[in-house]
Amino acid sequence: MKLWLARHATPLVQGGMCYGRQDVAADAPATAKCAQALAGLLPAGTRVTHSPLQRCAQLAQALRELRPDLACSSDPRLQEIDFGAWEGRAWQDIAPTELQSWTDGFAEYAVGGSGESTSQVMARVASAFDELRGQADTLWITHAGVIRAAELIARGTRQITRADEWPVEAPSYGQWCTLELQTHS
């Protein structure tokens, strides 16, 4: 089976802001452009699951308008990392000591004091990923952090301990990648 991992279009936030779980809209024309491209590529019967955050729900809705044959559902496990007290702050305003604490304790550090740890993100994405077994081709409309976690899980990595193990690359806004997954248990 093929897992499509699409990142939402450009969010309507000021550049340099930490906005993980913050529910912000995406640029409407960019969302429409991404939906148009995906609509022409997705095979019939593809399941569409999206993060409930509006920047992803917008893309799911735009895609559904173009492809009413696609079954869409929302899954909170596909939300971006919760950055706790860092949400809505400029990255440059977060104390270097806080960022260093996150890097030093990457697996278990609760980001922003009250947010999620990388281990928690990996566990919830793995839970959604494990439900893909035996399913039809699936599109996840999600966020860069979830895409990075899914790529690690697809390679057999379910836990990471160091920040340098976390993938740097992710699709740009309104772009996607695909993973070929084994269909047997």
Image (cartoon, grey):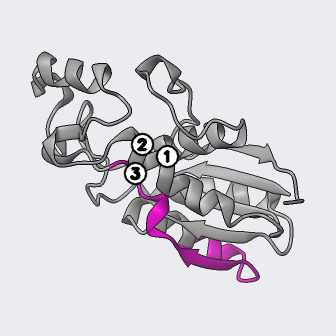
Can you identify the residue that label 1 sits on? 122
Looking at the rendered structure, the kind of residue marked 2 is: Ser
Q: Relative to the observer, which residue lies in front, 88 or 151?
A: 151
Asked if the residues shown at circle 3 and circle 2 are in contact, with their CB atoms under 8 angstroms apart, the answer is no
Compared with 157, 7 (above or below) is: below
Check residue 150 in the rendering and tell me which mark sits there, or answer none. none
Can you identify the residue that label 2 sits on? 119
Q: Residues within 10 Å of mark 2 (few under 14, many from 20)?
A: some
Instruction: Tell me the element at label 3.
Output: loop
Looking at the rendering, which quadrant does residue 2 occupy?
Answer: bottom right
Residue 29 shows up from this direction? yes
Q: Residue at x 42, y 42 (%)?
A: 119
Looking at the rendered structure, the kind of residue marked 3 is: Glu
For this view, does 40 lie left or right of residue 170? Answer: right
Query: What's the CA distance linking mark 1 and mark 2?
Result: 5 Å
Can you identify the residue that label 3 sits on? 80
Question: Count of labels shown?
Answer: 3
Name which of mark 3 and mark 2 comes first in the sequence: 3
